[in-house]
Image (spheres, coloured by chain):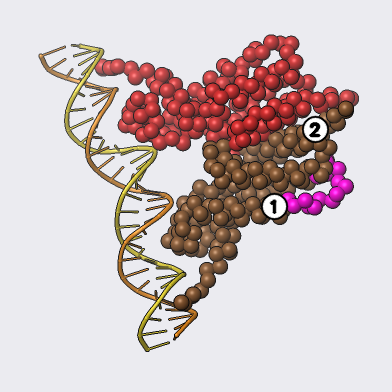
Chain colours: A red, B brown, C yellow, D orange
Amino acid sequence: MPHPRKPALDELVDRCLAAFVQAGTLDISLDRLAHKVGSSKRMLIHYFGGRENLEEKAMTRLEERLRAQFAPGSFPQGATPEVVLTALWSRTTASQSKGVLLLVMDLSRRAWNGSKRAKAFYEEQQRLWVDLLLKYLPDRAAVEEVLQLFQGAVLAYLITGDPEPGRRALMRTLAIPLKTP
Amino acid sequence: MPHPRKPALDELVDRCLAAFVQAGTLDISLDRLAHKVGSSKRMLIHYFGGRENLEEKAMTRLEERLRAQFAPGSFPQGATPEVVLTALWSRTTASQSKGVLLLVMDLSRRAWNGSKRAKAFYEEQQRLWVDLLLKYLPDRAAVEEVLQLFQGAVLAYLITGDPEPGRRALMRTLAIPLKTP
DNA sequence: GATTTGATGTACCACATGGTTCATTTAAAT
DNA sequence: ATTTAAATGAACCATGTGGTACATCAAATC
């Protein structure tokens, strides 16, 4: 049985993800997506079997990428919370992160609109960040709070374009005294 | 010149807003919207001149509603921050608020996607909450932080359905010591 | 009661979407 | 070289969208 050229599916997924990131959303038509990745709607459906599967593959790839980027050990062990949070906030609000940020928010939207897969994505991100922050913050309550604050700050930043309020709020929240027993 | 029945446009806007709230988004087709409000796409376009104008009218109406609901004076003057924030959080996470919450988040999405009008809506909400919180929190920095935390908490609540982490984070953030000069 | 003018329904249009059909090409296995 | 199964393109389809054309209806003014 002849097995002709192999389409290098993995690379196609990468390019699709790149297109999604550039668009800041998964909601881009197959035609536009195909054009952007140098293929055709016909072929995308051929390879992936349908839009749903394509999106699933792209989400999984994004999860992998983010997991690598925020792996425990991205920061020195002894760093202060201030340093870590400042670095995270800078990285997050860097202009080249805009696309990923928008895409992640788009997935959040899908999550709160009921998408099972998007909800799983959100939870995975949650775990990732909890694991990261737990190494620099005193307790789970602090992590929990910083995480929610971070998300709110991202939201505000995306809308206003101003990263300063978010930075200020994050720094301020670190001033919370430790729970004394 | 005969001026036949007046269509009570105001009430139509109300019903449209109600439909948007029920849908948790502005992105509902004119056909479905019309059916929901007991009219027809034909008539909605006739009355409003197009979808854009309809959305604009609905947003403005929503602004009015929220402005009334969170008017300064919704809470006793002397209330502690804990009491006020707890009440606000309860109100926000009450099941009957789900639709408005989703709709407001949908508008946030439009805002971060570049919609001028949605951005204005966001800023108006911002002002509203700042004015409210400024009466119970020590300084602007505190208000700024609580506001961002609140938004992040709402996001998490919408996705997970669990209001507890948000409540905990809000309470925790009130433990920040006053800036001492 | 005739006229005028808005209210309304039905059918329609142009366009975009995800997906399919069908026919053709292409590369590997024999 | 022939066979075989995948790769690919072009046209097509069903569906849903905002919006329009046209014809009809109904109410207020004269």
Q: Position of residue B179 (x, y in %)?
A: 85, 29
Q: Is residue B79 magenta?
A: yes
Q: Which residues are magenta?
A: B70-84
Q: Is residue C2 above or below residue B58?
A: below
Disc 2 to disc 1, C-alpha distance: 28 Å
In the picture, residue A38 is in which quadrant? top left
- Hey, what amino acid is under mark 2? Arg
Q: Callout 1, which amino acid?
A: Arg
- Badge 2 or badge 1: first in the primary sequence: 1
Badge 2 marks a residue whose secondary structure is helix
Residue name at image x 61 percent, y 45 percent: B120
Quarter of the figure with residue A86: top right
Is residue B112 part of the magenta span, yes or no? Answer: no
Q: How many marks?
A: 2
Q: Residue at x 69, y 31 (%)?
A: A165
Image spot of residue B62 (x, y percent): 62, 53
- Classify B36 as above or below A94: below
Q: Please, what secondary structure does the residue beneath circle 1 have?
A: helix
Location of mark 2 (residue): B172
Closer to us: mark 2 or mark 1?
Answer: 1
Q: Residue B174's x, y, as percent? A: 82, 34
Looking at the image, which residue is at 69% across and 10% down?
A76
The dominant secondary structure in magenta is loop
> Which disc, if any, is residue B67?
1
Q: In the picture shown, does residue B170 fall above or below A141?
A: below
The chain to which mark 2 is attached is: B
Q: Is residue A24 left or right of residue A73?
A: left
Quadrant for residue B88, please give it: top right
